[in-house]
Image (cartoon, rainbow, N blue to C red):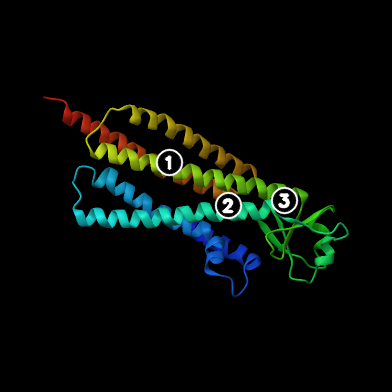
Amino acid sequence: MINWGYYIFDDWRAARYTLSAGEPLIRWMIAYATSIDELAWFALLFLFELETYWLSDDALSRVKRFIFVGIRVACYGFLAHTLYAYWVEYVEIVDAVLLPAATMVCDLAGQDFSFLRNLAYTEISAGNCNALSAGGALFQIGGDAVVTDTPGLAGVRGLAIVDLVEATTWLAVVIIIELVVVVQERGTTDSLFLKFSNHLTIALYSVLVFVTGYWIWGGHYVYAWDELLWIGGFAAIEMNLSEWRDELHEAAVPG
């Protein structure tokens, strides 16, 4: 929850440089995609904990099932939006406009431009412009008053790719959990799908550990810490599923 508060602040801080009054709602949602994403994950984690531990031995009523499905559909809608937002940001970075060769960072001082490097925005002024870049090509990102140099562009492009990989991987993780829950609700404890899902889940968590390492390498320690917390949270869900499967197996064995 503390990390979520940090993300809201972080999104707000970046939005000051990428949004202006009169922007459509979708642009605001894209700017606050991480905060919205985190809220959806909280709801999903709570639902999975209910289904795989507290309610794993109880049949859900039709009303409860309807409520669960409704909340889950809304959460997946927000997660799909996150993936879309990350894709939009990636495309904007890839399509960054090369400014005229004669343009220097100091030429943009006093024009409400900001300089982007490693997700940090700095408003360009006459006092700091010489320290922001060592020179070379400058790129404008997404039509906003945001510029960066060649190393800065490579850095944010790498982070955008990692965001896409991370969001896609987590979606794959929860889809597998959803399917496992459905299979185990039918009383199945041993199947080729369950064995395959175990191996695939390990591979997906390995990707998330790599993402964590990438963020540590880039100096984004809060992102890395938050990722480890979510991996731990869903590891608890995986243990719930395993214990539930053991209980089902024991109940199916005579005597």
Q: CA distance from mark 3 to mark 2?
A: 16 Å
Residue 2 in view of the camera: no
123 horizontally vs 91: left or right: right
- Label 3: few (<14), some (14–19) or many (≥20) C-alpha neighbours in 10 Å: many
| Residue depicted at x 72% and y 51% | 153
Q: Which mark is residue 64?
A: none
Q: Amino acid at mark 2?
A: Trp
**Mark 3–mark 2 contact, CB under 8 Å?**
no
Q: Nearer the viewer, residue 46 or 97?
A: 97
**Mark 1–mark 2 contact, CB under 8 Å?**
no
Quadrant of the rendering where the C terminus is positioned: top left
Q: Nearer the viewer, residue 71 or 131?
A: 71
Q: CA distance from mark 1 to mark 2?
A: 19 Å
Q: Amino acid at mark 3?
A: Leu
Residue 106 in view of the camera: yes
| Residue depicted at x 22% and y 29% | 249
Q: CA distance from mark 3 to mark 1?
A: 30 Å
**Mark 3–mark 1 contact, CB under 8 Å?**
no
Q: Residue furthest bottom?
A: 22
Q: Secondary structure at mark 1?
A: helix
Locate residue 90, reporting x and y percent.
62, 51
| Residue depicted at x 43% and y 41% | 173
129 horizontally vs 38: left or right: right
45 horizontally vs 83: left or right: left
Q: Secondary structure at mark 3?
A: helix
Q: Which residue is mark 1?
A: 173
- Label 1: few (<14), some (14–19) or many (≥20) C-alpha neighbours in 10 Å: some
Q: Amino acid at mark 1?
A: Val
Q: Which residue is mark 2?
A: 87
Earlier residue among tags 3 and 2: 2
Q: Nearer the viewer, residue 133 or 138?
A: 138
Q: Which mark is residue 153?
A: 3
